[in-house]
Structures are given as C-alpha cells and as structure tokens.
Image: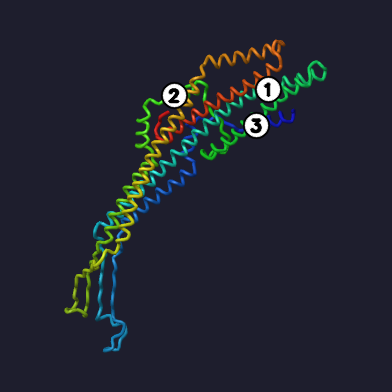
Amino acid sequence: MRVVLVFAGLVTAISGFGQEPRTLEDCETAFIKNNLSLLAQQYNVSQADADIAQAKIWDLPQVSFQTNLYNPDAHKAFDLSKANSLSVQQLLYLGGKKKYEVAYARSNREQALLEFDQLLAELKARLNETYYTLHYEEKKLIDINTQLTYMAGLLEAFKVQTAKGNTSLKEQVRLQSMVVQLNNDKIGIVNAILQQQQLLKTFTGWQENIHTAITDSEDSILLAKRPLIPLETIKQQALEHNAGYRYSLKNIEASKINVNWQRSQNVPDLTLGGEWDQLGGAFRNEVNLTVGIPIPLWKRNKGNVTKAQYQVKESQANSDMKKLDLETSVELAYQTWENQYDQYAAVKAEDLQNLQTVHTGMMANFRKGNVTLIDFTDFMDSYRQTILQLYEMKKQLMIAAQELNRLTQSKIF
C-alpha cells in the first residue's frame, strides 16, 4: 500500500513540475502565433496568390529572324547584305480566356482562405475543449488528493490499532480497499491531465506543462452562460459564418466560372504579327501585317465543357448536403448542450452545501465513534463518486458549449 501511495505521489509531482498558470487567452495567442498546422495552411494561401499572378501572364511574343546561310551566286557564306527577314508574332486570347482564368484563380484563393478559416475554427475549438478538460481534471485531482490524504492517514492509524488487537483486520482491509480505489482514480486523472497538457503543448508550441488559471467565480459565470438567441437564429448564424459551408458555396461559384472558362477554349485565338522582308517579297524592304486564326470546324473543348457542367451539379449537391449536415449538427449540439445544462442546473447550491455539511459531519462523528466503519466507508465512496460526477458534468457542459461555437463559428458562449 505504501508503494502505491508513493508511486501516486511521484506521478502527481511529475505532472505538476514546471507548470505555470495560463489563461485561455494566453493559450489562444500562442496558438495563433506558433501552431504549425496554421502556418502550413497559410502557405496554401500564398500559393493561391502565386496562381493569380501566373494566370495574368500572357504568352511571350515570338520573334524569328531569317538570313542567308550560303549565297551560291557570290559563293559566300552568311551573306548578310541580302535576303534577310524578321517577323514578330503575338498570340491574343479571345473569348475572355484570360478573364476567366484569372477569375478561377481568384476563386481558388478565396477557397484557400476559407480552408484556413475552417482549420482555425476547428483547432481553436479543440484548444478550448482541451483547456476546459484540463481545468476540470485538475479540480478532480485536488478533491481526490484531499480524500486520499485523509483516508491514507486513517488507514495507517487502523494498521497500528489492528496490530494492537483493538480493531479487526476486516476493518483494515475495508479501508485499504477505499485507498486503492482513490489511488486508481488518481492515476486515471493524472494520466488524463498529462494527455491534455501534451495536446496544449502541440496547440501552443510551448515546451513547459500548462496549468489552467480559472477562478471559482469565473467558473460559475462560464457554466451559467446561456445563448441569447433561439435555435433557428443559431442555425442561420452557422450558415452565414461556418467556413466549411461557405467553402461549398464558393466551390459552386468556382465551378460555374470553370464552365465559362472551358467554353471560352472553343473560341479560336488570334495570332497577330508584323514581318519585314529585305528582298523576298514583292518589294524591297517589304513590311507586312500577319494575322492567323484557327478555322473553328468543330468544338475542340466540348468534352471539358460537359465535364465542367457536371462539376457544377456535383458542387451544388455537395453544398446542399453540407447545409443539411450543418443544420442537423447544430440542432444536435444545441440539444446536447441543453441536456447538459439542465442536468447541471438541477444541482442546486444548497444541495452541494448539504453534501459538504454531511461529509464534514460524517468525518467528525466517525472520529467520535458515533458512526460505524461500514456506514462511513459507504458514504465516503458515494461522496467520491458524486464529486467526480459533478466535475465530469461541468466538463461535458463546457465541451458542448464549445461544439456550438465551433459549428457556428460565432461567440454563442
């Protein structure tokens, strides 16, 4: 038993070593600055900017020069005095090809920004959930440590009395079972704390362990918050602000632009140029205008146009599905939060006060011998479970609130 207690104490010491109280705002600031996933996503936006710049670039003009390689009359190689010609040609896009190409690239950039916004919202929600989970696991640990300290001390006293024959071994074993259960709870809580701290390190980029900084008054205010708008308005906010759904709408727009772009490929492009010929034309130093255009005997891009049209229909179907999924998810999240809130609100302040009053009274009466060991351990086990359930209830309430914030990407709570 002493080995178990020592081991549990060492785990607690390890988990607490180097911890520094950090507010949620501190963590969010570090998250925005240091999170590698966000930094990587920002590069996608930069790539989209480069695609826009590339789309604006026209084909380079083509210059060709022709000169004499060998003059058979004068038996002279590279006779540059005669038979030279120079031409310059430029491809001109018709049908709005460049306009649609640039518009498509700009639409892709807007999608990249929405992807960034969606990733930011997802990671921020997970950061908040992790922070609140850590907070309530720490609260659990404080209570379990308090109970464990008392019960472990009581067990040591019973061991002395059992050795003297004043108490039975059965009573000692009953207390020992309580201490084992408390130690098991403690190890589970410590492992949960270590896991949440590791996640916070990943989110924030900090190397040291993080300890939450939420006062009891702040905790009460957070738990008492309720949405100020009805469910239907919350759904509407989700449709207006959720970057994932907005991405699906932007994808429809991009698909329509692509249809126009593919159609424009069927319009022949014009090649315009000028030509100077020293002796090869009808006149000396002849200057000519050249114009070239393919003969549109068939639509060379018909297949891609059809494909793009089907992509519009696919994008519309995906967007409709995304809308339905978002609305149902918001409704489920709201109902989950409401259930958690009702459960939390059902526990009144006087109920908690009565629990603590009975707990204090049981310990005092047990020391005086007014309560049997069986009644005492039964109550202490019930008290242990109740305290853990209360903190778990609060944790789940905060997680449900963060889920609504994530889906709506608004400050509902």
The residue carrying mark 2 is 225
Q: With 351 as the anchor, is 241 left or right in this view? A: left
Amino acid carrying mark 3 in the image: Ile
- Where residue 302 sits: x, y (%)? 29, 61
**Callout 2: helix, strand or loop?**
loop
The residue carrying mark 3 is 187
Q: Quadrant of residue 239?
A: top left
Compute the Cα span from label 3 to label 1: 15 Å
Q: Residues within 10 Å of mark 2 (few under 14, many from 20)?
A: few
Amino acid carrying mark 2 in the image: Lys
**Callout 1: helix, strand or loop?**
helix
Amino acid carrying mark 1 in the image: Thr
Of badges 3 and 1, the one in the foreground is 3
Q: Residues within 10 Å of mark 1 (few under 14, many from 20)?
A: some
Q: Which one is earlier in the sequence, the residue at label 3 or at label 1? A: 1
Q: Residue visible at 82% across and 20% down? A: 163
Q: Residues within 10 Å of mark 3 (few under 14, many from 20)?
A: some
Question: What is the image's colouring?
Answer: rainbow
Q: With 66 as the anchor, is 229 left or right in this view? A: right
Asked whether residue 106 is in view, the answer is no
The residue carrying mark 1 is 149
Instruction: Between residue 338 and residue 129, name the one nearer to us.
Output: 338
Q: Quadrant of the C terminus?
A: top left
Do the numbered discs 2 and 3 sit on residues whose CB atoms are within 8 Å?
Answer: no
Instruction: Between residue 16 and residue 135, name the one nearer to us.
Output: 135
